[in-house]
Amino acid sequence: MSNNKENNVNKPRSMTAGARNVLRSNDSTSLWNCTLSPGWTQDESEVLRKALMKFGVGNWAKIIESGCLPGKTNAQMNLQLQRLLGQQSTAEFAGLHIDPKVIGEKNSKIQGPHIKRKNNCIVNTGDKLSRDKLRARVMSNKEEYELPEEVWKNIELPKVKDPLMLLEGKKEEMRKLKTELEKVQAKIQQLRQAQPARVQELQSQIEVARSPSPSAPDSPALSV
């Protein structure tokens, strides 16, 4: 994380047992929830979270090999990792067995005019870290956030036995969404036919709302 973030968040105490390095459902901090990348469900995001704890951040080959997230690519998982961490930079956690939501929850509390976000992820606007500084940052994060080996080794991941069944389920979900969309479009068309004047009025109101407000003609110019 950047120096700006370190100035805004207190570092956690040493966590020898790893209990404080995992966000649990009964934690008050667990009210925070990351956003989802396109194509991700909340359940899939939770599976990725556990897979990252088990295999380490960025170990996409092991995650794909495990079969817990069939169909997900390296790029897709990396984008959702950023959402879980709440920051775009992931290099400082490379290979670490951490709960990304612990980092994300802390990042969600960081405020200030110097903090820039994209998709709710903090964007690093500072200089790129040198190789030595990045290595030091990884070691620091390992000491503070990494789970004990006996914890991450025993994490159980779901296995999708039949990827074709999963794809069929997604297709069925898409069919249902398409049906709902068609119903909404049909209702809109019925409204246009039954109340054309009302539809025209609503469209006019939308256009007025979108148009910029005219400046007051008699407003005095601001002196510089």
Image (cartoon, rainbow, N blue to C red):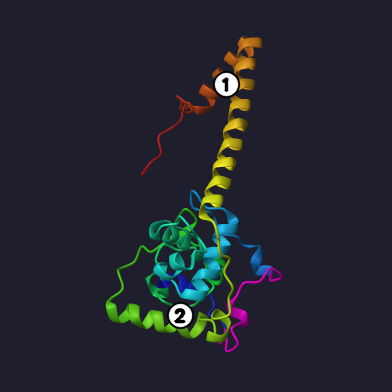
Answer with left or right where residue 181 lies relative to residue 137.
Answer: right
Say which residue label 2 marks.
141
Position in image of residue 163 (x %, y %): 51, 55
Count neighbours of disc 2 (C-alpha within 10 A) and say few if under 14, some if 14 to 19, many if 20 or more.
Answer: some
Position in image of residue 201 (x %, y %): 60, 15
Say which residue label 1 marks.
205
Residue type at numbered disc 2: Asn
- Magenta: main secondary structure equals loop
Residue type at numbered disc 1: Gln
Residue at the spot 59% in from the left edge and 27% down from the top edge: 182
Residue 180: quarter of image: top right
For label 2, the SS is: helix
Q: How much space separates mark 2 and mark 1, taking CA atoms?
A: 53 Å
Residue 21 colored in magenta in the image: yes
Answer with left or right where residue 54 lies relative to residue 183.
Answer: left
Residue 191: quarter of image: top right
The span picked out in magenta is 13-27
Position in image of residue 32 (x %, y %): 62, 62
Position in image of residue 68 (x %, y %): 52, 64
